[in-house]
Image: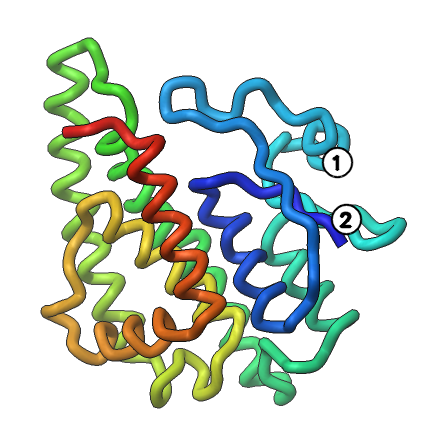
Amino acid sequence: MKLYSAPLSLFARKVEIALAEKGLPFERELVPFSQAEGYSPKHPAVEAANPKKQVPVLVDGDLTLFDSTVIFEYLEDAYPEPPLMPRDPKARARCRLMELTADEILLRPLVKLMYRTEPVHPDLERREQQALEGEQAERELLDLYRMVASKHEGPYLCGVFTTADIAMFMSVLYALRLGGPRLTSVPSLQAWHDAVGSRPAVAAVAAEVAEADRRLSRKA
């Protein structure tokens, strides 16, 4: 099994956690990335596999997949033990919704904070606009944190550790690394974050992201 990933790819790192949690050995190839140039040059295997030309791309024998959610679904079908999704259909649907919330709902304000690690925009007016958008994004994220906290069950979002926890942890991790709102005002979400972050597979990825940040992000 081979995974095309990238140092600061939220979605590829999601897949790395799932593979580690399932105990599946895999070869990882990191594609070229820098804050100044982005994903350039594009990796030819990624270009060939994914029309969006993005990681993650997973190759398992004669099967090539892209999109972290599609990959999650495949891993659960092909390698069901240990499970990373509930068995009950309604619980599984809730798990999928929570993953979608992380990947799509939190992502909308999250992308407005990404300028903080990118090269400084040369236009002053654009920099001021970015700052205003960033402040609004922080408020939106805090509201979303409270919404997520109101829905989670026990130590994990769906009662047991699932793909929803992986996705949400990565989105929150990226919000925090971009200077987003702290979790101290949402204690139950802070407790959840600590529990998920203490899992070896998650902690290893979080440490690699922090190290990549030190190498690749612009300094304030």
Q: Residue at x 86, y 53 (%)?
A: 61
Depth check: give the residue in front, 194 or 212.
212
Reply above or below: 16 against 119: below
Q: Are marks 2 and 1 in contact (CB under 8 Å)?
A: yes
Instruction: Choose the circle earlier in sequence order: 2 or 1.
Output: 1
Q: Residues within 10 Å of mark 2 (few under 14, many from 20)?
A: some
- Dot 2: what SS? strand
Q: Count the numbered circles shown.
A: 2
Amino acid at the residue labelled 2:
Val
14 left or right of 150 in image: right
Reply above or below: 216 against 22: above
In the rendered image, residue 187, in percent from the top left (x then y), is placed at 16, 77
The residue pinned by badge 1 equals 49
Q: Residue at x 56, y 76 (%)?
A: 93
Q: Residue at x 37, y 55 (%)?
A: 207
| Quadrant in which the N terminus appears | bottom right
Q: Which mark is residue 59?
A: 2
In the rendered image, residue 77, in percent from the top left (x then y), is placed at 75, 72
Reply above or below: 12 against 161: above
